[in-house]
Amino acid sequence: MRRKSLPRLLVEQIKISIDALEKAGVDNPVLDARLLIAYALDCDRLKLLMDVDRTLSDKEILKIETLIARRASHEPVARIFGKREFWGLNFDLNEDTLDPRADSETLIEAILRLTQTPPSRILDLGTGSGCLLLALLSEYPQATGLGIDLAPGAVQQAKQNAKQLNLSKRAEFKVGDWLENISEKFDIIISNPPYIASTEIPDLMPEVRNHDPLRALDGGTSGLEIYKILIPQIPKFLNPGGMIVMEVGQGQANEVISMMQQAGLTKPSKHKDLAGIERCVIGWKSP
Ligand code: GLN
């Protein structure tokens, strides 16, 4: 127990917190401890280190220790903050949204590289926080888009994110089951569907397994069940010359390319993420 007569300095609290996260087997104990302490004290991470000799109040210590305990139980920092930066934009998260991954920025980069005519109409299937659609709308000021998600909580969060990013005039979000109620054609269809095989879910890191929505992760027996349902329908929903852009898991790109070719889509390409993993597959409808 901490004795009242011995005030705790910030420098000591940082060390105690790093040790606690290290002991819990958290991946980046130093960075995460600093992020969480800065958040608790409402200051930025650099300022935190300039003031390490100050004494903490009991209230501040309690606030810090509550956050550190959450991280020690493997709740991700982004979940604790309730927000994540994606493509330089801020996205609020809730329990119905996947925590956007930097890997998914591969899809946006690939689209920007390959697109010759800016798209007018974009569809995002399984939109979650809305990060893919809203990142694209931020890049294509003439475009409008529709984001679909089965979870009403995700749709509500995506709408709120659009509003905060000043994109709500061009972004519509609806509850739906993939392509079920769609009756128009698009220039780009983008999707990060669930692609982890059901049998692999128990082996995921607790940060993912316990905090991302299972519905956004579980791709059924093969991991590719959603691709098998979606890809054959895609040509019907693309304008001539339109593109389908899908995120895939490690080792899935070639199979997804075959599915696209079988559906009559052309010019397939694969795009690697920063770790060198083939993360994005693109196919086109002939002009
Ligand atoms: N990229 C996520 C992960 O591997 C999975 C997201 C998904 O299934 N689409 O943790």
Image (spheres, rainbow, N blue to C red):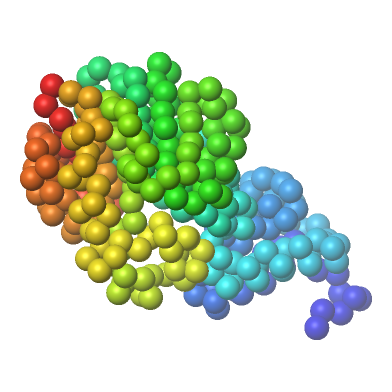
Q: Position of residue 282 (x, y in %)?
A: 20, 39
Instruction: Give me the residue at 21% from left, 34% from top.
Output: 236
Q: In the picture provided, is 18 more to the left or to the right than 3? A: left
Instruction: Give me the residue at 44% from left, 68% from top.
Output: 209
Front residue of 59 and 167: 167
Front residue of 143 and 204: 143
165 versus 274 height, above or below? above
Front residue of 149 and 213: 149
Instruction: Give me the residue at 29% from left, 65% from top.
Output: 220
Q: Position of residue 241 (x, y in %)?
A: 17, 24
Q: Position of residue 118 (x, y in %)?
A: 30, 19
Query: Farthest residue in the right direction?
Result: 5
Q: Position of residue 2 (x, y in %)?
A: 82, 79
Q: In the picture provided, is 137 more to the left or to the right than 94? A: left
* Quarter that holds the N terminus: bottom right
212 versus 134 height, above or below? below
163 versus 213 height, above or below? above
